[in-house]
Image: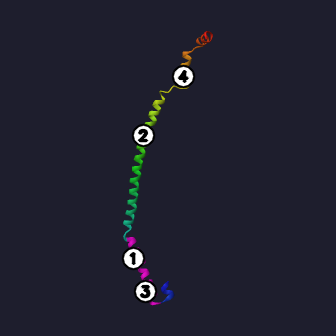
């Protein structure tokens, strides 16, 4: 565009240099497409490795939490429920004993 507007020797030279520069850029990009793709593949590979490591850590953490929960559930099995406590209390004191206790006391 510069060449067509100014029509000077310098404008023609700069315009030709401009076109040559863009042609070199195009040739560079076409010649290095494999490298550009390899860089992206390398980044994906690194991210995949990081993700795999993080997943392994999470699995270990989940295993630890599952073990803790298993221990808590096992300990809860030893806890007496309210209904079991009520049954135990009823077995210690029946209605007749309750009446005798009140009369004697």
Vertical order, 31 against 12 (above or below)? above
Contact flag, marks 1 and 2 (Cβ < 8 Å): no
Give the x, y percent position of residue 59: 42, 44
- Density class for disc 3 (Cα within 10 Å; few <14, some 14-19, many ≥20) is few
Magenta residues, as a range? 8-30
Instruction: Give me the C-alpha separation between circle 2 and circle 4.
Output: 33 Å
Residue lying at 44% horizontally and 90% vertically, measured from the top left: 9
In the picture of the structure, the residue carrying the numbered disc 4 is: 85
**Disc 4 on helix, strand or loop?**
helix
Q: How is the image coloured?
A: rainbow
Q: Do tag 2 and tag 3 residues touch (Cβ < 8 Å)?
A: no
Identify which residue, 8 or 88, lies in the foreground: 88
Task: Look at mark 1 in the image and give the residue it sits on.
Answer: 24
Secondary element at image label 1: helix
Inter-mark Cα distance, 2 to 3: 72 Å
Which mark is drawn over residue 13?
Answer: 3
**Does 37 appear above or below 78?**
below
Q: State yes or no: residue 16 in magenta.
A: yes
Which residue is tagged 2? 64
- The crowd level at tag 2 (other Cα within 10 Å; few <14, some 14-19, many 20+) is few
Magenta stretch contains residue 78: no
* Disc 3, SS: helix
Say which quarter of the image contains residue 18: bottom left
Number of the front mark, 3 or 4: 4
Is tag 1's residue or tag 2's residue first in the polypeptide sequence?
A: 1
């Amino acid at each position: 565009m510069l060449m067509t507007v100014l029509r000077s020797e310098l404008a023609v030279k700069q315009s030709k240099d401009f076109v040559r520069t863009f042609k070199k850029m195009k040739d560079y990009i076409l010649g290095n497409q494999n490298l550009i793709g390899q860089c992206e593949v390398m980044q994906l590979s690194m991210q995949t490795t990081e993700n795999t490591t993080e997943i392994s850590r999470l699995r270990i953490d989940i295993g630890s939490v599952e073990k803790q929960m298993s221990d808590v559930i096992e300990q809860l099995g030893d806890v007496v429920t309210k209904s079991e406590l009520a049954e135990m209390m009823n077995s210690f004191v029946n209605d007749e004993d309750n009446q005798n206790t009140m009369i004697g006391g």
